[in-house]
Amino acid sequence: MFPLRRTPKEPDIDWPALLALLEDDDRRATIARLAPTPGRESYLASLRRMQSSTVSETLTAGRRLDTSSRLVDRPTIAVAGMLNSGKTSLVSSFLSPAGQRRTLRGTSNREGTHRFVLWLPQSWRQDVELWSLLVSRIGDSLGHPPEDLAEDPVEAAAQYNNRSGDPAQLAVALLATDPALDEIGVGLLDCPDIVSDEELGLGSPEQRKALLGRAATLCSAFLIVTDAASSRDTTLADLMRLASDLMPGVPRMLAVNKVRPRQSPDQVHETFLLLSKKYGVASIYAAYDYDVPTSRPFIPKPQGEDADNRLAAAVDVGQPFSAPEHGSSEREPLPMFFEVAPDADDNPPAAIDDDRLLMSLPSKLDRGVLFAQLHRALRINLEKVVWDHGLDSIRTNAEASFAKTRECHHVLLDAALEFFANRKIGGEVVELRLHQSERILRQLSESFAATAPWYARWGVRLNSTLRRFVGGAGDLIRSLTPSALSQRAADDIKGRFRSGEYGGLIAPEGLLAEIKRHGGTVVLSHYRDHRNESDAPASFHNDGGSHNDGGWSGDDLLLLPPIERAVLRFEQDDFTTLDPRRLDDAIRQMWAEIPMHKKLAHGLTPLATIFAAFGAALMVPLDFGANFFLAASIPELLAAAGLGALSAMWASNQSAREVGQQAARQQLADFLAVLCDELGVARPDPPLKLRVAGNEVTLPLSRISRSETSGPTMPVYRVREEFVSELKKLLPRSAVDMK
């Protein structure tokens, strides 16, 4: 008979200290917010941000554990079961005649239990402080304060049966006291019937099981009532699993009601033994159906006058029982449960001791051991709520923020590579393209001019100012295309850029189209979410002068202004330069490999043609607008100018190719960083990797200063190990998982 042994003493949990940790948003904070602005969050604040019900579960579990020591001598037994299993009949067997008349018994739906009814010893109400604590614990567990069970049997029956038809009443417990419980000193929680479907319209089975799980934390023991035919019923297994999972270590018993004489007590034991072992049931009780005359040998009669007073007189074996009308004074027979033994000789019809009767259970309970088991169960329940539900949810949310941000990074990288990558037909990236900024084009022009042999300079007016251009882009263009012939060549090359034959012409609308094609309008959901919350989409797409002239949807238009800002900002803030020494060496080597007689059509020398290509690249933002720029590799610039041999030489020379690729990697990293800034996404950390020409390369850190966006942001969170260390001290995990 349980409890068989005392559990080892475990460290006490200081709930006020633990609560202080869970509310700390400073030194011991749970969350470090890495983006958009650094900050910290407490455990409870993080759960509230996630709109998690674990906040109330945590506070309730903590208060239950903190106040449990005051209820050490006042245990409560939960009695749960399926419809018509005989739960209330079992509860009634412990009540006085007056209390029995306030219960609801029968086999029809109008006699089912559809509320929690907590029966407590009448003397407990006299202790005002204790009673207030009990009421608050019930309210904490079910979410609503209880109401009193009516004294009038008819009104009490209506409450028991929830005849108002309101499913919400399931969470409002009924509270009653009875003097007969003073003697045994325990409370009895008569739980709602666990129905198999929602046919009754008074709460689904899932709702009832969820509430049962919450109410179970009030109880020091768990008694499950079933009938003899339900050994394979999945609902019975669910109930036993619920008791095992939610209140580990708390004693569990099984009461099998309405057993027919054809099944002997040892057979009942054998039938339910496997299920009982699986879910840690300590004792199996059985009660034979008193409506069947041949059951009489299996219905033990307790000894003593007190037992006779609390139970109805023995049923006449020859007369089947007819239940009296509810609320009448006629005494009803009640099921007589006894603990079944595996040996047939130890069961009725043989005589058994009274201590095997279920009615003697309260007198055998060791309050100290029972409280220790309840206390540990409440402690483990608090651990599960804080560690498994709360902290795991916070970790999952933090990891999801990293994963979502990383997904955004890859979408933006893939979209940018549509312009910054030169690919083979199969899609493999063979080289990265340079943003052909004025700074880069000046470097290229000066280096090509400074290293060009005499034949390449023929027809090109070179002077000292070519090495130190002054003025704006217009001055540089006029220097690069001094004649009408070179101007026409530049226009022709510019047309090749515009058509996409060479390089990638980057415009906000084109970049948005690629982001959308790669799933960016779905991944960048914080814009859509923010619009739904504020119901003011105009605030996101009215600051850049953009209009919906490209067939964009509302979600697309939200992204267009920040993309426009990113393109313009990158064009203005890109100060990447080529390595001048390595650039001069590469171009000098290329000139050395060009035959002296190599000439081009249209009368232009190689240098003039190269300058025309540079001029064409520089015209892009002037011709198309400030929000356009060209990305093209050095070989592509040469190829666009018709200098195929020079392009091939540059591409095949590892040293020459690396000059441009080093700068291109920096520019791609800077562009991604600016794009992330304006779209409210944290910058890549660690840096992204990609494959170029069959090799994995890592993008460098951006050199452009971080800027905060005025639009929506995607936060990134990390669980702080400092909090986890403190939590281990205040709420260490149990060494043994009780079942």
Image (spheres, rainbow, N blue to C red):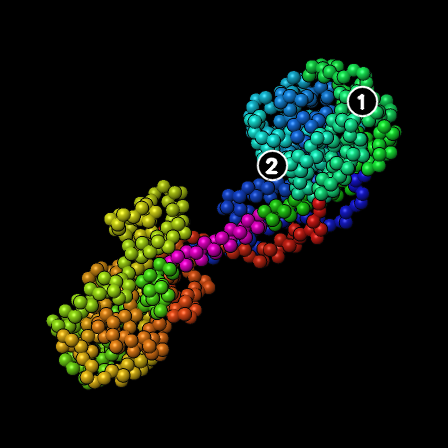
Q: Amino acid at mark 2?
A: Ala
Q: Nearer the viewer, residue 425 or 641?
A: 425
Quick check: can you spot residue 50?
A: yes
Tag 1: amino acid: Thr
Residue matched to label 1: 294
Residue 551 left/right relative to 340: left
Instruction: Name the front one of labels 2 and 1.
Output: 1
User: Is residue 629 visible in the rendered structure shown here?
Assistant: no
Left or right of 546 on screen, residue 139: right
Residue 495: x, y in percent?
Answer: 20, 64
Q: Tell me if mark 1 has few (under 14), some (14-19) or many (20+) residues whose alpha carbon lies within 10 angstroms of its own.
A: some
Q: What residue lies at 37% left-to-right and 55% top-to-bottom?
A: 518
Q: Where is 422 relative to 382, above or below?
A: below
Residue 248 vertical placement versus 684 (above, below) = above
Q: Locate the C terminus and report the quarter of the image it occupies.
A: top right
Q: What residue sits 51% from the left and 54% below the top?
A: 399
Above-or-below relation of 604 to 497? below
Q: Which residues are magenta?
A: 390-412
Magenta-colored stretch includes residue 401: yes
> Does residue 212 appear left or right of residue 3 in this picture?
left
Judging from the image, what secondary structure is the residue with disc 2 in? helix
Label 1: state its secondary structure. Answer: helix
Residue placed under numbered mark 2 in the picture: 210
The quarter holding residue 412 reads bottom left
